[in-house]
Image (tube, rainbow, N blue to C red):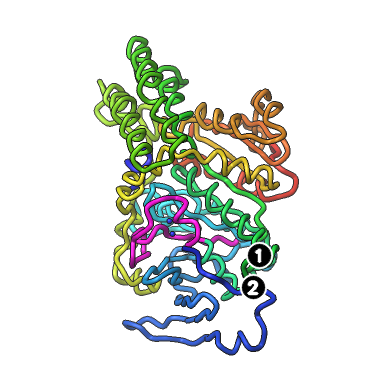
Amino acid sequence: MRWILEFAIGALLVTSTTARSTSLRAVNKRYVEERNGVNYNVFEHAATNSKLSFVENSGICETTPGVNQYSGYITVGPNMNMWFWFFEARRNPQKAPLVAYWDGGPGTAAEYGLFTQNGPCHFVNNETEPSLNPYSFNEYANMLYIDQPIGTGFSYGNATVNSTKSAAPYVWNLLQAFYDSFPEYESRDFSAFSQSYGGHFGPEFVRYIVDQNAAIERGDIQGTDINVVALGVSNGWFDSAIQEKANIEFAYKNQYRQLINESFYEELLDSYETICKPAFAKCTATGTTEDCFTAYMNYTNEIEWPILASAREGVSDFYLGDIRVPYSRPPTTHVEYLQRADVQKALGARVNYTDSSSAGPFIYSGDDPISFIPALSDLVKAGVRVLIWTGDADYLCNWPGTLDVADAIPWSGQEIFANQTLVPYTLHGTEKGTFKTLDNLVFMRIYEAGHNLPFYQPEVSLQIFRQTMEKGGLVPT
């Protein structure tokens, strides 16, 4: 169901920091290239045989004086041109951390989150030109937005990736080439944020980075060590076996609106136990495309579609990402804006903008039912701060389901964490949600927020974002 709302990447060898010798720099190249009337800054990276082509300070979106931005492409594989859009921090960019953001879907462009939730600009009151977002994440961090997989957003070329695990090496390759082109960011703390299907992407991509760091340290590969400190996923889809059962419970009982009656609730629980649960177990046991696709089809047909049909009864317009009546959801004004020829030329985009590419390859590969709790476990054990935060008006990746996921993560503090109660989290003295935290694992429920959490609660989202990357942890204000 995540792709209904939002409708990625072999690894290449990279140069290490110590390998940037005089002889290697001699074969790396920097120059300016004119293409279709656009002047690109080009960096040819010899170690990866990749090429960065980007426009500096396009004047699009981020218009704060003195804040730099770069937009363009990095070749991450054969005819695979991945789009990035980088914004300096508005405050102290020389020391601010670096944060990578990719969206969910699978196949939703990073610009969706950029323009509707956490980026430097947004559209207000049906305006056709964006204005500055005072709660942008680049108020605190240097933000790197990445369109993945290929075919999403402004990325283009061979769209061969069809699973989360196959997507990870290409994102790592982009980061390696980015660091070599912009070495001033190498020593910064690095974090990654995502949402929705980012419950797959986030844990796996960051685990891959941590594993590559270990391989670099062992001398197995060459590359730039990335100082990973945090992963944040809002309203994430991590584990369908856990979250599908939670969907049934949430549809029957939540604080906003009952979506199903008691008898239907009992029917759905029976379907889950007799049809869906065994299929999830088989997918986990074999990991085959056939078994995992079957698990996906079972829960879609037996749970998701019936709940959707029931929820729509008697309601003329309904959105599972915000079950309140009336609901609200982010505007899509950015799509038409990014499809304008003048905007694309200014940014250096070479193809038309696609907000959501097809989720089909990921669905048919059986990627959706795969659990990424093992990846979360590896990250928590490795000392990476993990934030799982959820808007409580969202059905699709609802807060009881993501709480169950957080409680199920195996690590030394699992039992203590699972038995903790949620306590209030405040912003300037006003309660905005509840949370619990132990060491480097945090769970948060945010009130009055739907699937795209920062859209609904921008000010508290910025506070949570900032605190996640600071050593003091999550602290109510």
Q: Residues within 10 Å of mark 1 (few under 14, many from 20)?
A: some
Q: Disc 1 on helix, strand or loop?
A: helix
| Residue under the image location 36 percent in, 71 percent down | 79
Q: Which segment did they paint magenta?
A: 142-171
Does the segment drawn in magenta span residue 49?
no
Q: Nearer the viewer, residue 212 or 331?
A: 212
Q: Is residue 435 left or right of residue 276?
A: right
Q: Is residue 55 left or right of residue 35?
A: right
| Residue under the image location 25 percent in, 21 percent down | 313
Q: Nearer the viewer, residue 146 or 202?
A: 202
| Residue under the image location 36 percent in, 58 percent down | 152
Label placed on residue 216? 1
Q: CA distance from mark 2 to mark 1?
A: 8 Å
Residue 244, position in %: x, y? 42, 28
Residue 368: in sight, yes or no? yes
Image quadrant assignment for residue 338: bottom left
| Amino acid on which the number 1 mark rests in the picture | Ile
On the rendered image, what quadrant is the C terminus found in? top right
Residue 186, position in %: x, y? 65, 68
Residue wearing tag 2: 16
Q: Residues within 10 Å of mark 2 (few under 14, many from 20)?
A: some
Q: Tell me which numbered mark, 2 or 1, is placed earlier along the sequence.
A: 2
| Amino acid on which the number 2 mark rests in the picture | Ser
Q: Disc 2 on helix, strand or loop?
A: loop
